[in-house]
Image: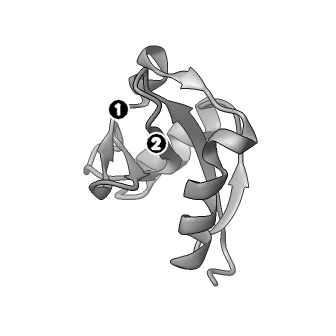
Amino acid sequence: MDKEITKVIFRMFGDGQVIALFPEIATDKVGYYCQSYMHNGQHGPASPGLVNSTKPTKQEDYQHLFDELKTIGYNLKVVKKFTQSMQVTRKAMYN
C-alpha cells in the first residue's frame, strides 16, 4: 500500500456510475485536468468541472470503487470538494 495519502472525491453520473477524482494529481503539463478512475476504463484525465454534471455520493454508493482502489495500492482520504489548495498542488506537479 502507498504510504502517501491520496485525496479522492467520489461523484456519480446520472446513470449510476461512480467516478473517483484525484484533485491533487495532474494529467497534463499545466495542471488543469486531474486523474480519475472508474471500473470501466480505469485511469484517465478528467476536468474538475465534472463536479457540475455529477452528483455527490454516499459511502454505500462508492464503497466498491473505494475498495478496488485500495487493492491496487492507494491509501485514500475521501474529501467532498475541490479546493484552491488542491488546484495549486496539481499545477505545481510539473513546475
Element marked by disc 1: loop
Q: Can you tell which mark lies on residue 19?
A: 2
Percent x, y of residue 82: 59, 31
Q: Residue 88 or 57: which is nearer the viewer?
A: 57
Where is residue 10? Give x, y as percent.
58, 40
68 with respect to 38 (left or right): right
Q: With 29 as the anchor, is 77 left or right in this view?
A: right
- Nearer the camera: disc 2 or disc 1: 2
Q: Does 93 sit above or below residue 12?
A: below
Along the viewing direction, whichever of 79 and 18 lies nearer the viewer: 18
Front residue of this view, candidates 7 and 86 = 7
Q: Secondary structure at mark 2?
A: strand
Which residue is farthest bottom? 1
Label 2, label 1: how far apart the Cα atoms are: 12 Å
Give residue 16's mark.
Answer: none
Q: Amino acid at mark 1?
A: Ser
Quadrant of the snapshot with the C terminus: bottom left
The quadrant in which residue 57 appears is top right
Residue name at image x 62 percent, y 45 percent: 62
Of the image marks 2 and 1, the number of the one nearer the N terminus: 2
Colour pattern of the rendering? one colour
Tell me: residue 81, above or below residue 9: above
Q: Position of residue 25 (x, y in %)?
A: 46, 54
Work out which quarter of the rendered image holds the N terminus and state it.
bottom right
- The x, y position of residue 55, in whole percent, is 55, 21
The quadrant holding residue 93 is bottom left
Identify the disc placed on residue 47: 1
Q: Amino acid at mark 2?
A: Ile
Q: Residue, x 43% and y 26% (percent of image)?
A: 13
